[in-house]
Image (cartoon, rainbow, N blue to C red):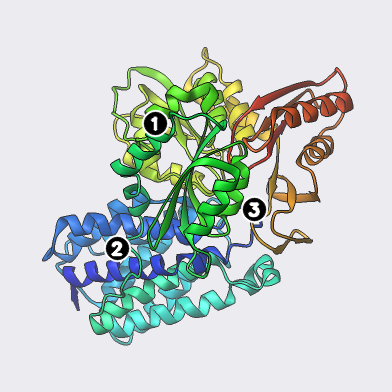
Amino acid sequence: MINGNCLLNAIVSGSNNINKNKSLVDKLNIFPVPDGDTGTNMSMTMSSAVVELQKAGADLPIEKVASLAASALLRGARGNSGTILSLLFRGFSKGLCDLENATGRDLVNALAIGVDAAYKAVMKPAEGTMLTVARVAFEKGKAASNISDDVVYVWEEICKGATEALATTPDLLPVLKKAGVVDAGGKGLCLIFEGMMSVFKDGTIISDDAPSGGSSAAQIFDDDFGATISAFDEEINFTYCTEFIVGRDASVAALPEDLRTYLEGIGDCVVVVDDDEIIKVHVHTEDPGLALQEALNFGQLLKVKVENMREQNRAAKESSAASLRPSLAPVDPVEEIGFVSVAAGDGLRTLFKDLGCLQVVSGGQTMNPSVEDILQAVMATPAQNVFVLPNNKNIILAAEQAVSLCEDRKIIVLPTRTVPQGVAAMLAFNPEANVMENFRLMSAAIEHVKSGQVTFAARDSEYGGFKIKKDDILAFSSGKLLFKAKDPVKAVVKLVHSLSDKHTAFVTIIYGHQITENQADSAFKQIQAKLGTRVDVTLINGQQPLDYFIVSVE
């Protein structure tokens, strides 16, 4: 039997174990573009619970520990993996309700509630994923609890079940087998369960070799750093003020000084601050894309901010000392309908605001906002019904979890998986129609838009029948890799041509900050020439950090 202190220590130990191994989990990602953030998302989600539990102190009954952890995990959940993790632990909150201590059988029953909630939350649950690992772990634990309700015995069987299920994930998902890896989320869950086992069995909290995971990315945005970059931003020798945070990869031998040396070769006003877990960077440069690609050699990008200093110097100075995601003050829901969107890049944020989104949450590929980030934006929107546009497949589940946390207004999540889908949905909004009619109109618009992206490969891999080398230029549509290319402009022209047909009426080209105006103009002219005057082609400077181009074809 365990008490509240034991469960609290187990959660801390599980958090530490995923945090120290998150780069290992990130590397299991099979998608070739910058997207390998499963370990980082799970680590940051677990760390949110640790922060709240440490505030609460010791000697709490087990139901209180489980309740505090579940609430913090849900609000801090990032990405699909983090959200599923929070749902698993929500089961602990419900299953351990009214208990001061818990047996192994109690833990299994709690895990059963969490597994059921996680499966129900995913629209099309696939086996060979984190869900499979959780389910088989529960089934193994359930069988063990019928023999004995000893916590150590039962949890050992849960860990064994998770490990055995993880080994089967390549057989259940051919894409994993082809890549020669197991499921990343499943591996992360095994690490968390193993960290908890260390406390249940030996009373030992697995140490964290780095500062506590989730909060350090925010902590590095301290006053000294802000003051330094604020002073630097008085100088405008290069166009783009670029700031980003890298989650360090423990296997990388290169030092932050190597990154600093590289950045000094492509810009000025370089500030590099690091600890054992992250590297925080500020640089002025003409090509932020080069800086970000070099940063990927040191680990995963956690946050990115790029501003055009020549056009937005005042805004850059005001925001340089601020958090990337400042808290938003709640407002009364006085209007009928409002909108919240997720987007990365000043141009895209401006676009969505121009389309009617009062709040635009900073985030996207590799930068998944938390449930709390989305909830804060909703609460800062003065509407009784708030449509949320995630614009990324890995943010939809987190947005859906915000629904249950909002009491004084209704959240309607439009499952936009791409920026073009989000734009199409906003354009379909009819201010004369009611909420349900607009939901129908906007949902239909999502289905009728074709989305594509031109980006770069973050790693060597085999994907979609292609052998991919790091930095290859890749063209995708709806998550499917269509072709490789050597030039982003030629790639976007070919991509738009492949997505267009005789019914195409509108094409939107959104170019990123690593694309020059000359390159964008060249792409625009070539596409217009190929499609002819019957198609309305629009060019937008999105300033998105990772994609060379995002395209919409309607």
**How far apart in space, not on screen, are marks 1 and 2 (Cα)?**
40 Å
Please tell me whether mark 3 or mark 2 is closer to you in this view: 3
For the C terminus, the image quarter is top right
Residue toward you, 447 or 218: 218
Give the vertical position of 241 relative to 312 (above or below): below
Residue at position x 35%, y 35% in the image: 322
**How far apart in space, not on screen, are marks 3 and 2 (Cα)?**
35 Å
Q: Amino acid at mark 2?
A: Phe
Q: Amino acid at mark 1?
A: Ser
Residue at position x 52%, y 12% in the image: 432
**How far apart in space, not on screen, are marks 1 and 3 (Cα)?**
29 Å
Image position, residue 79 (x, y; %): 48, 51
Mark 3 — residue? 33
Disc 2 secondary structure class: helix
Q: Is residue 183 left or right of residue 9?
A: right
For the N terminus, the image quarter is bottom left
Of all residues shown, which one is farthest toward the top?
432
Mark 1 — residue? 319
Mark 2 — residue? 92
Residue toward you, 417 or 547: 547
Q: Amino acid at mark 3?
A: Val
Residue at position x 46%, y 47% in the image: 281
Q: Is residue 548 left or right of residue 6?
A: right
